[in-house]
Image (cartoon, helix red, strand yellow):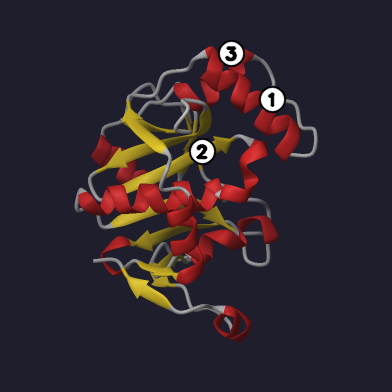
Amino acid sequence: FQAERLTRAEYQKWMDSGFRRSGPVIYQPMCQGCRACAPLRVVLERLEIPKSQRRILRKNEDLQVRVAVPRPTNEKWELYERYQREWHDGQQAGDLMGYVNFLYQSPVESIEFEYRHPCGKLLGVGICDVCPRSLSSMYFYFDPDERRRSLGTFSALYEMIWARQLHLPYWYAGFWVPGCEKMAYKTRFRPCEIMDTDGQWRAYVPDAAELAGSPSAVSVP
């Protein structure tokens, strides 16, 4: 369904019922005979950051981060268009109005993280929704030329640390599908929980292969 306006508490309830938003549309994936899409959230009170992720944080210490009300600009549109074209196998970004509707027409209270190089160049943009018990990561796009920085991981960690400082207990990462390689990164942020088909949040338990490849982690103070 499409919503013109939802309070923080209302949208929190929808997310905890298995829904997400795309622009002004609140939806839940439910294909015939399949319930593979599962909401995932990270427990911020016990957030652990392994060495590999700590290296990414250090690698991006030079970035300037601005948190503000989301606003579309030509600079952001050009970055989004190039991200879609170069990072998503030539996928077209659509038109400017579609971009604005998708990312900047929000029925809930949203914030925007801008990540800039010390010279001022825009490297990444993240849109998040703020709820009473969570920060929900809605979308992130970045400069494909800066892939060495692992900006996707850095932005997620930055959002989590920012939300933790506000004493929000959870960071919502959207939907996760078991066995989907493109979504596997979401379970690398731990501890995390998956919403089961009965609507209950349960701790995600890594399989043996994941545990064998997991580096040591430290808790965030």
Can residue 36 be seen by looking at this rendering? Answer: no
Q: Residues within 10 Å of mark 1 (few under 14, many from 20)?
A: some
Residue 116 is situated, as x and y percent measured from the top left of the image, at 46, 32
Give the secondary structure at mark 1.
loop
Q: Label 3, on which residue?
A: 97
Q: Label 1, on which residue?
A: 93
Q: Quadrant of residue 98?
A: top right
- In the shown orientation, is residue 81 left or right of residue 121? right
Q: Quadrant of residue 182?
A: bottom right
Give the secondary structure at mark 2.
strand
Residue 200 is situated, as x and y percent measured from the top left of the image, at 38, 66
Say what amino acid the circle numbered 2 marks. Tyr
Residue 61 is situated, as x and y percent measured from the top left of the image, at 41, 48
Alpha carbons under labels 2 and 3: distance apart = 17 Å
Q: Is the Cβ of the residue at disc 2 closer than 8 Å to that at disc 1?
A: no
**2 or 1: tag closer to the N-terminus:** 1
Say what amino acid the circle numbered 1 marks. Ala
- Name the residue rendered at 51%, 38% in the picture: 139
**2 or 3: tag closer to the N-terminus:** 3
- In the shown orientation, is residue 154 left or right of residue 182? left
Q: Residues within 10 Å of mark 3 (few under 14, many from 20)?
A: few
Give the secondary structure at mark 3.
helix
- Name the residue rendered at 49%, 14% in the picture: 73
Q: Label 2, on which residue?
A: 139
Residue 221 is situated, as x and y percent measured from the top left of the image, at 23, 66
Q: Is the Cβ of the residue at disc 2 closer than 8 Å to that at disc 3?
A: no
Q: Residues within 10 Å of mark 2 (few under 14, many from 20)?
A: some
Say what amino acid the circle numbered 3 marks. Met
Alpha carbons under labels 1 and 3: distance apart = 11 Å
Can residue 194 be seen by looking at this rendering? Answer: yes
Q: Which mark is nearer the camera, 1 or 3?
A: 1
